[in-house]
Image (spheres, rainbow, N blue to C red):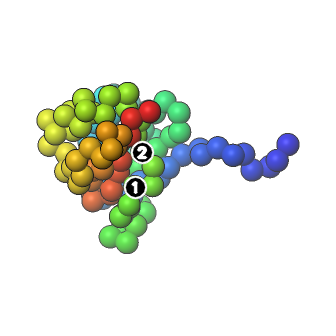
């Protein structure tokens, strides 16, 4: 057995304000903001599959994702796009190739939604 698994365990996202980021991500992902903020700077989002950890300790203007490091899955890209519009999320592209679109979180991280 190889000592390094070919799996992504978790992705860290740099955020300014851990409480505001927790609430924003939980809102757009439709999950409850359960669990505690760890060490005053970490919040583990309740995800299915690969994890996401919001981290206010690593935030700096240089740490912000300029291009998406991952994407959120959707089964209906048009519905997901309209949902993000109603949430007044900063959309940075329209739906591309009927497959994906990009947006920014309140801290300026570039993120993506893609139809699976």
Q: Residue furthest right?
A: 1
State left or right for residue 43 relative to residue 89: right
Q: Which mark is residue 13?
A: none
Local secondary structure at mark 1: loop
Residue 22 x %, y %: 32, 42
Label 1 crowding class (10 Å Cα cut-off): few <14, some 14-19, many 20+?
some
State left or right for residue 114 relative to residue 93: right
Location of residue 34 (image quadrant):
top left
Label 2 crowding class (10 Å Cα cut-off): few <14, some 14-19, many 20+?
some
Viewer-closest of 99 and 111:
99
Viewer-closest of 49 and 76:
76
- Residue 82 higher or lower than 111, as above or below: above
Label 2 near label 1: C-beta < 8 Å? yes
- Residue 14 higher or lower than 100, as above or below: below
- Image quadrant in which the N terminus is located: top right
Q: Residue at x 21, y 33 (%)?
A: 83
Q: Residue at x 23, y 37 (%)?
A: 81
Local secondary structure at mark 2: strand
- Examine the rendering and report whether any part of residue 57 can be seen: yes
Q: Residue at x 35, y 51 (%)?
A: 111
Q: Which residue is mark 1?
A: 68
């Amino acid at each position: 057995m190889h000592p390094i698994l070919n799996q992504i365990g978790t992705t860290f996202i740099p955020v300014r304000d851990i409480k505001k980021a927790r609430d924003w991500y939980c809102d757009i992902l439709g999950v409850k903001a359960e669990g505690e903020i760890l060490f005053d700077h970490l919040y583990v989002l309740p995800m299915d599959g690969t994890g996401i950890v919001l981290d206010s300790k690593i935030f700096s203007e240089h740490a912000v994702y300029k291009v998406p490091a991952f994407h959120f899955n959707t089964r209906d890209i048009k519905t997901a796009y309209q949902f993000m519009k109603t949430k007044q999320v900063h959309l940075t592209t329209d739906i591309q190739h009927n497959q994906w679109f990009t947006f920014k979180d309140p801290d300026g991280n570039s993120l993506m939604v893609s139809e699976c």
